[in-house]
Amino acid sequence: MDILPAFAERIIQVDGDEGRDWLTALPATFDRLIERWELIPDGPIWHGATALVLPVVACGEPAALKVSRRNDATRHEAAALR
């Protein structure tokens, strides 16, 4: 999994070593979630300010797997997306 340089730079700039550690763990996090939910990757990864999004197929339907850096701004994001 390629983490886009602009995204990595922003995370490290904002979160320092904690952000660097989170970035290092991201490939394993995506792998674990893809396996757990039986997802099929379906396109290149893209990013916003604090998250990476991978287009996937879930149960035969297009979907997206979004993994965000947890902080005050994203703490309630999962509930909001539901």
Image: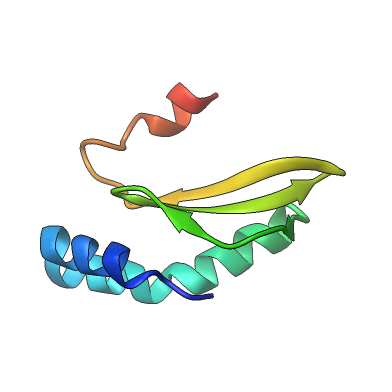
Residue shown at 23% from the left, 36% from the top: 73
- 52 vs 9, left or right, is right
Residue shown at 70% from the left, 52% from the top: 56
Quarter of the picture containing the C terminus is top right
Question: Where is residue 70 drawn, in percent x and y?
Answer: 31, 47
Question: Where is residue 80 drawn, in percent x and y?
Answer: 44, 23
- 10 vs 75, left or right, is left
The image quarter in which residue 3 lies? bottom left
Question: Where is residue 57 drawn, in percent x and y?
Answer: 77, 49
Question: Where is residue 64 drawn, in percent x and y?
Answer: 62, 45
Residue shown at 87% from the left, 44% from the top: 60
The image quarter in which residue 1 lies? bottom right
- 30 vs 13, left or right, is right
The residue closer to the viewer here, 62 or 26, is: 62
Q: Height in image: 71 above or below 19? A: above
Q: Report the number of discs.
A: 0
Q: How is the image coloured?
A: rainbow
Residue shown at 74% from the left, 55% from the top: 39
- 26 vs 18, left or right, is right
The image quarter in which residue 76 lies? top left
The residue closer to the viewer here, 14 or 33, is: 14
